[in-house]
Amino acid sequence: MPTRRTVLNAALVTAGSGVFTGAALTPLMRRGEDAAAVEPAAANVDAPAVEKFKLRMPVPRVLTPYSTSDGVDRYRITMRTTQAEILPGLRTTVETYGGYFPGPVIRARSGRPVAITQRNSLDMPTSVHLHGSSVPAIDDGGPMETIAPGGSRLYTYPNQQSHASLWFHDHAHHMESEHVYRGLYGTYLLTDAEERSLPLPCGAHDVPVAIRDAQFDAAGQFVYVMGDFQNRTTLMANGVAYPRFEVAARKYRLRLLNSSNLRSFRLRLADGGEIVQIGSDGGLLTKPNPTDAVFLSPGERVDVVVDFSRYAVGTQLVLENTLLNGGPAEQLGQVMRFDVVRTATDHSEIPSVLRGLPPLPQPTAERTVVLSMDETGGANAKGYINGKTYDPDRVDDFIRHGASEVWTVTNTNRFVPHNIHLHLVQFRVLERNGQPPAPAEAGLKDTVMLMPGETVKLQATFDTYRGTYLYHCHLIDHAAMGMMAQFKVS
């Protein structure tokens, strides 16, 4: 019997050369608080018990360009499998960029291009998307613009946008879900003079943290079933299950990313201590947002500062997740632990003003976007945008170059949450359910969550590149079952 991988491999190898063979994907449906389309479930093998906080949380490796000539930072990255210690004492096979799990970090500067030659040494086609970036359509990593096994592709990122905490991940249609689940994601930190002028924590005290869930079998290997939200109950931070992270008694900047396929998080310190949000998807907020918890749906980023100087050396402080969705609290309620191990001098500060954002232009057009998916189950359950599943040969929306549009996005499902991610642009949230956005959503965004029945109004300006781009649900299993559409800027 052919596997899902072998069927899709045949389809997407052809797609990489511009021809789509239309391989069928016929998932089933389970109902739950975060239900999604799934294939017939594999045996639910219990993972080994995990001793929490035994392993240290790794800090992702920052890559060095092999060339910086002509004002361009050039990298070579090979996608390949390797093994990583996610669960204490066990080795898990993972798919990686450059052999790094967690994925590597690329540090870039606004106005200075980055060129990355991505070579695919995996056994499946891939497509690399720089999430949150403004790039020419040819370099956007479209679902059908795949790299065949053994092939390579050059992606060029002009970086003609302001600072932002971006990330890159696979986007090969129908396979993006499994590839990201198995490890194909990394961090891309874009900075500019405005951000560098601020006295925020930096260097070793500026730490990317990717948080996600997974399911493992008894041997410690990933168990992947499309949409299997309920069984992905082991939490990871930077590629390690329930790690500990040693910190000094000073301020740290934590760049939080939700790299899960489906699961959202509400993160708080166990003592209810203050977390200061300073940024969102598209960079710094205009001013700090002191809070006791931050929310992250899949694909979203939240930039926070935690001041550990208020804790004595020897303190052990757990980062909790309070969004359990009916799952086991002993697995889903704790993410990682901060261990305060030393004192330190700290000259960093959180300014009262972080950046200025220009006033929104007068809108030139309005659009309505409806997100939905089948909630009745069955072998042909699919996801829809405006009643249609993704067709790579169809353009759904035509946008005039230079237009500033207001999109009213509604999740019409009764049980299933969705979010929406627009390629090419960072947008501003105007309203959520008719109310002004909360401080957490007051900055630049590229991904925004919608619970069942919710409506979000956003405004985006399309004044950079022309071409055809995606918008889709970034509960990435939903995208894999067809919840994607295309707009063309011309």
Image (tube, rainbow, N blue to C red):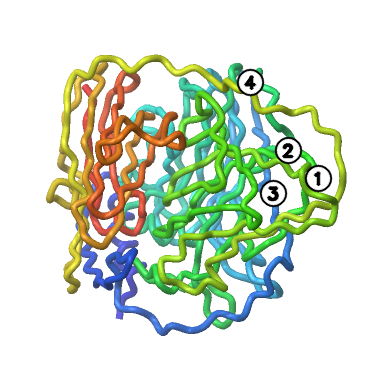
Q: Amino acid at mark 3?
A: Val
In this view, the residue in front, 219 or 312, is: 312
Nearest to viewer (mark 3 / mark 2):
2
Nearest to viewer (mark 2 / mark 4):
2
Q: Is residue 82 visible?
A: yes
Q: Which residue is mark 2?
A: 251
Does residue 54 lie above or below 350 as drawn? below
Classify 10 Å Cα crowding around label 3: few (below 14), some (14-19), many (20 and above).
Answer: some
Mark count: 4
- Looking at the rendering, which quadrant does residue 375 occupy? bottom left
Q: Which mark is residue 174?
A: none
Does residue 223 lie above or below 249 as drawn? below
Q: Which residue is mark 3?
A: 59
User: Which residue is pictured at 65% across the width and 33% down the height?
Assistant: 65
Q: Amino acid at mark 2?
A: Lys
Q: Position of residue 440 (x, y in %)?
A: 46, 37
- Of marks 3 and 1, which one's residue comes earlier in the chain? 3
User: Which residue is pictured at 17% across the width and 73% down the height?
Assistant: 378
Q: Which residue is mark 1?
A: 248
Q: Position of residue 253 (x, y in %)?
A: 66, 38
- Looking at the rendering, which quadrant does residue 414 occupy? bottom left
Q: Which residue is mark 4?
A: 69
